[in-house]
Image (spheres, coloured by chain):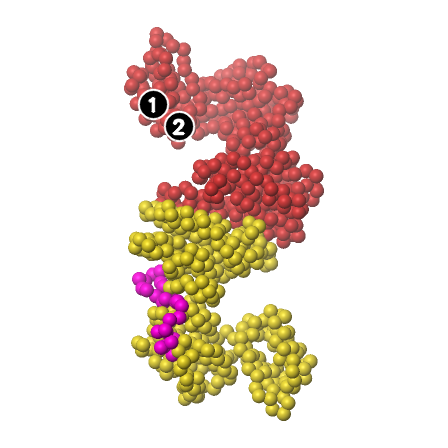
Chain colours: A red, B yellow
Amino acid sequence: MALIVQKFGGTSMGSIERIRLVAQRVLEEKEKGNQVVVVVSAMAGETDRLIELVKSITPEPNERDMDFVVSTGEQVSAGLLSITLNHLGHPAVALSGWQAGIKTDDAFTKARIISIDTERILKHLKEGKIVVITGFQGITEEGEITTLGRGGSDTSAVALAAALNADRCDIYTDVDGVYTADPRIVPEARKIPVLSYEEMLELASLGAKVLQIRSVEFAMKYKVPLRVRSTFQPDEGTLIKEEDETMERVVVRGIAHNKNEARITVVRVPDKPGIAAKLFDALAEANIPVDMIVQNVSVDGYTDISFTVDKNDAQKAEKITQKVAQEIGAREVIRDDKIAKVSIVGLGMRSHAGVAGKVFETLANYGINILMISTSEIKISCIIDEKFTELAVRVLHEAFGLDKEH
Amino acid sequence: MALIVQKFGGTSMGSIERIRLVAQRVLEEKEKGNQVVVVVSAMAGETDRLIELVKSITPEPNERDMDFVVSTGEQVSAGLLSITLNHLGHPAVALSGWQAGIKTDDAFTKARIISIDTERILKHLKEGKIVVITGFQGITEEGEITTLGRGGSDTSAVALAAALNADRCDIYTDVDGVYTADPRIVPEARKIPVLSYEEMLELASLGAKVLQIRSVEFAMKYKVPLRVRSTFQPDEGTLIKEEDETMERVVVRGIAHNKNEARITVVRVPDKPGIAAKLFDALAEANIPVDMIVQNVSVDGYTDISFTVDKNDAQKAEKITQKVAQEIGAREVIRDDKIAKVSIVGLGMRSHAGVAGKVFETLANYGINILMISTSEIKISCIIDEKFTELAVRVLHEAFGLDKEH
């Protein structure tokens, strides 16, 4: 008998009809003889409705009461699923975050799970019940209700799977798995049957919006096998698990792209120690995360520094950079919002030489200029002109044979 | 510094605009230097919406999960009020039933409050905060969420007032107090400034739908002064409190009427011991509450038994009565749905003779036949033909001078 944690998102819980379909997915797992814990999001649109209600009072509500209100969305959907399961003759019980023992810190609206006291869940599982738990929420040591921030239900599911030592955590969503590239751009993109946590993290943070990054980190830390699959189609989806020896055979697993960054360049910076620190300290102080940083070789005591930030932060970052540029005597600051990041990811890159060269050559063959490059052990990211994004993804997908069975 | 508990119903909490008005009522009390605990219902229509959602899955949902879902309505409204108060610069905190320490039995959907652990409420009051608490709900010893049944927020408020030893419990609603009769029937009806718990109980159970009966019983038991007042008009409303010596001076406090009963008569019952017991045991077993019972004097070994039940139970009660009538050899069973109960209530009736006579005489003067009579120390109820209801209320109201200042 295995213990399976299933997670269903807002679209899957969007109506009474869809909740009936979710109940079917739950019962399929239960009828295999498994113990099942289900984590649910609020019905699609409900969290937004509650936030709007709150914001119609004031755009800056106190966050403690905000969480108190917004957390009710999952309580309703969890209750409705449990009622459906009971109605179908299968004993089930709905638990809120606090009832399920999900303890968090007190960073309201973006709390982090600290620990899970599984006693009550285990008691209900022992009674043969399906346990339906509200995602996205927990309780502080002082008994205050918290929420985990957008997408937090994935994290709830993985954290519960870790705490319960579950055999698997299935993330049900409206796509049927992780693809070698965005199928809307590359029609030949193939579903990836298995990949490692590290690869998924690179793909997730690079723009494949299938899973919340934090939930993948959590799964990796506690070695919880994750499966991404569709609520609406019977399919095994994509399994994300610990690296094994077979995985390195695939050089490139997938290609991600991201149009949500902007590049800022500080031109002709005096190349003295502490200059870069001054700039990036100022950005950190303003709570602006920086993604890629490239500094050219110094020529006659001057250098150029380029970096990328999220487009939403670009204007603010530009202002701060201009101020610092003046202080350090740089010539000017240039901001470019029309860029894209295209990345190839694969464990096999560790042991295969020539991957970077093939990327650069492929892009060059199509006249695509590379503005910045950044690499890690298992990925290569290139910043290019935004207008080439789709073309770059397609030609790289073909060049690395991702359209073919491995 | 007094401690005041205020309760606001669903109509008062019906929109963001109305919640702003409620916040004003709260702050008026706070600004007098008082400590304030606020108990709220769900926004008007919200509880019905949630029940409908649940009932669209199955007409017979399991009640435990039903309460889990339905209790969210108050959590939203309490949060919204607390956000409004904080936004206006007054520290406030919203607490759910379980956070406020409201312990109940486990009779889901109609739970009863067993005790209240006030520690957390008192802590927040000490910090100078306004404490906003969800009405209508609590938690069992096992940590399950319960609801108290329709109108339960009144009971929550009174129970909290009792547990906190509050100086007063103000029930804010959409009427501005308790009247000598229904003002829609008697335009001359006057608002009653003060009355006793006993009088309110008789008026409440006789059809004046201002307060939930259980909440008045609770207030009486714990001697909590209750005030019924309007959210929408500045007015002292009606104070309901312990009897004092001045109250008996008013012979008749008010007139209530109820068109929701039906009368069943068993004709020519053999007058033997145990016959009435047989009938009313059968009704009790079917869970049908009986209101008035009248048995005539026995003539030649036979008697007639009449009783009234709620109209919703009338058909079921008739069937049961017919079965018993056959067994005991009665002649026939007659059911009459076209009746009304008109009652006059007043503490002064204890010490004033002639009240009953005046009632009978007044009704007789207008050709109104009395079908059944029932009396207690402080009330006289008459069952009459339904079509005379309004006339009876009006002429009794005039006969006892209720339209004049006392």
In x, y percent, where is residue B22?
A: 36, 55
Mark 1 crowd level (few <14, some 14–19, many ≥20, 10 Å Cα): many
The number of numbered badges drawn on the structure is 2
Q: Earlier in the sequence, mark 1 or mark 2?
A: 2
Q: Is residue A47 visible?
A: no
The N terminus of chain B - image quarter: bottom left
In x, y percent, where is residue B89?
A: 32, 46
Mark 2 crowd level (few <14, some 14–19, many ≥20, 10 Å Cα): some
Q: Is residue B234 visible?
A: yes
Q: Is residue A171 above or below residue B36?
A: above
**Residue plotted at (34% across, 66% down):** B237
| Secondary structure that dominates the magenta span | loop
Q: Is residue B365 above or below residue A189?
A: below
- The chain to which mark 2 is attached is A
Task: Decide which of A98, B183 is in the foreground and name it.
Answer: A98
Query: Does the magenta segment cover residue B241?
Result: yes
For disc 1, the marked residue is A321
Residue found at the far top of this picture: A300
**Residue plotted at (35% across, 29% down):** A316
For disc 2, the marked residue is A288
**Residue plotted at (62% across, 32% down):** A225
The C terminus of chain B - image quarter: bottom left
In x, y percent, where is residue B402?
A: 35, 78
The magenta segment is B228-253
Residue found at the far bottom of this picture: B300
Which of the 4 quarters of the picture holds residue B182? bottom left
> What's the CA distance linking mark 1 and mark 2?
12 Å
Amino acid at pointer 2: Ile
Dot 2: element: loop
Amino acid at pointer 1: Thr
Query: Does the magenta segment cover residue B295?
Result: no
